[in-house]
Amino acid sequence: MLEVQGLTKRFSGLVAVREVTTTFEAGRINAIIGPNGAGKTTFFNLVSGYHRPTSGRIIFDGQDVTNLRPDQVARLGVARTFQTTNLFDQATVLDNLIVGHRLRTTSTFWDVVMNTSRLKEDECRCRAKAEEVLDFVGLSSIAHHLAADISQEERKRIAFALALATDPKIVLLDEPAGGVNPEETLGLAELIRKMVRNGLTVCLIEHKMDMIMSLADKIVVLDHGEMIAEGTPAQIRADQRVIEAYLGADYAAA
Amino acid sequence: MPSKTFQKPLLAVLLALGIVFPMIAANDYYIYVMSLAYIMAIAAVGLNLILGYTGQLNLAHAGFMAIGAYTVGILTVDYGVPYWAAFALAGILSAFIGFFAGLISLRLKGHFFSIFTLCVGFIIYLIIEKWDALTHGTVGIIDIPAPTGLGPIRFDNTWSQYYLVLFFLVVSMWVMSRIVNSLLGRAFLAIRNGEDLAETLGINLMRTKVLAFVLSTFYAGLAGALYAGFVRFIGPGMALESHTFDMIAFILVGGIGTLFGPLLGAVLLTWLTQSLQFLQDYRMIVFGPLLILLVMYFPQGLIGFYRQRQARRAAASAKDRRTQRAVVGTAQEARTNA
């Protein structure tokens, strides 16, 4: 599904990601963990086209996407969420989601001025998609609330919904459970499982170890930009380097 | 934003008011002032597209309005081009120059973009002021012909010119409403909300921003062309950034990122300026505190404030309906169980 080979990103002096080679398989939940500053978000930025890698290759679905722009990568089916999601607070939740499907439509500026049937069809499709993904993340009931008035957990789900509206094949989630309580975290984990059941591939960055250990099929551990381990949760839990760099002796013992 | 602020009846009333205004105005001067307010409103509506909807503060907007005005002025006075041919070229030329200016300046983000466009505006001013042979320099262009008649309609008095300007205002607003309420408008808004997120939603950042920029400069050129035919005298000063700041004030007062905000702001502030004329420069003493109060209590502008309340109310009533339905649902359930 997604394959990176020798991926390196250097910001002037600092190497944020160094020679990372790994594969994320389709239909799985993959997690990237590691201490702060390990290069996790940079890794996402590279895969989603926001940064150009200094060297290395990114292959998505058999296609080299190393030097594509974020919008091109999105069109190919890579969606992502951010740690914080800025919504248009003065509009409703549903209104905020409609733009998410824009990339799958073809109407141009002239369609807009002429108000052609193609534009109307496109707008119908986008609205239908917005309703569909809102239902998927379980927020149909707040469709007409102002985005300013929703809770942190709902905001996280909206971020998922926006990513899903692009009809992705893989979704990159950057700390999907950051800032929500343990109960809500379970709900979000269930939502992530539901996404995979529906044929998606997920790759997430998260610091909540309990969530990761129970959720992930595969874990990649980054430290100072380097991949120090990869494997199943059980393998990672037992890995001496991971315990030293990130988990700590207490966690391993527990 | 996509949710429409005004219902059709209210729009009809507004249009009717616009049409009867010359008949109830005390004298021609009032009609003249109102026409000028409309022209400024067209420019401000254009600026609002790039500033309010797309989130890019373009400080060269007055410069593009000047390009439109000078296109008409130079072509009609020095080259004898018919007014309407020059008029059509004005919008196109502004948008054409806007395309290249946008292509370069939109590579910068945030404040850097604003500072760059401030320079672009000043360069436009300098070119107009220094290029005597083409632009008549500091003297400006005088005796620009009034718009020539179209068929039986003549534009040789304030009344008819008022209706001409009103016509273009209505068309501009109508086209703008289509743009901002469409998927394209949503793409602009997505960029304003966050460029990173917009890009990961598959929106081509550069192309979309350049499109917004070109459209806004087209509006500026159109407003400038109307201005040239209406005031019939233009000078390099109209390209100065202080005029852009006037338009920004219109937008802020009326409501940034709202369709009617720039129009409301342009009309309100123009009349406020007129009625404070007797204070001369001291009118700023009234203006300043008023603006501060507005920014403190109505940061979204007048229409933005109104719309937010409306949206809250709609959300609340949707919630009510749901709870009612839920209550009815449980009642029914209870009955079935019984």
Image (cartoon, rainbow, N blue to C red):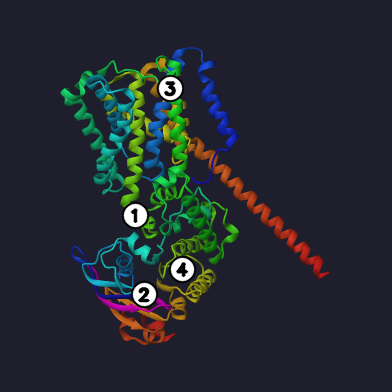
Q: Amino acid at mark 1?
A: Asn
Res. A32 mark: 2
Is residue A83 rendered to the left or right of residue A136? left
Q: Amino acid at mark 3?
A: Ser
Q: Are marks 3 and 2 on the same chain?
A: no
Q: Which residue is mark 4?
A: A177
Q: Which residue is mark 3?
A: B35
Report how far apart the C-alphas of labels 2 and 4 lie in the structure: 14 Å
User: Which residue is most to the front?
Assistant: B151
Q: Amino acid at mark 4?
A: Ala
Q: Are marks 3 and 1 on the same chain?
A: yes
Q: Closer to the camera: disc 3 or disc 4?
A: 3
Where does the magenta region start and end? A15-30
State the residue at coordinates (42%, 59%). Answer: A104
Dot 3 or dot 1: first in sequence order is: 3
Q: Residues within 10 Å of mark 3 (few under 14, many from 20)?
A: many
User: Which residue is most to the right?
Assistant: B338
Report how far apart the C-alphas of labels 3 and 2 lie in the structure: 62 Å
Report how far apart the C-alphas of labels 3 and 1 lie in the structure: 38 Å
Q: Are marks 4 and 1 on the same chain?
A: no
State the residue at coordinates (33%, 30%). Answer: B88
* x then y, percent, for residue A61: 34, 73
Q: Quadrant of residue B120?
A: top left
* x then y, percent, for residue B211: 34, 45
State the residue at coordinates (29%, 48%). Answer: B109
Chain at tag 1? B
Q: Amino acid at mark 2?
A: Ile
Q: Residues within 10 Å of mark 2 (few under 14, many from 20)?
A: many
Q: Which residue is mark 1?
A: B204
Name the dominant secondary structure of the magenta segment: strand
The answer to whether residue B255 is visible is: no
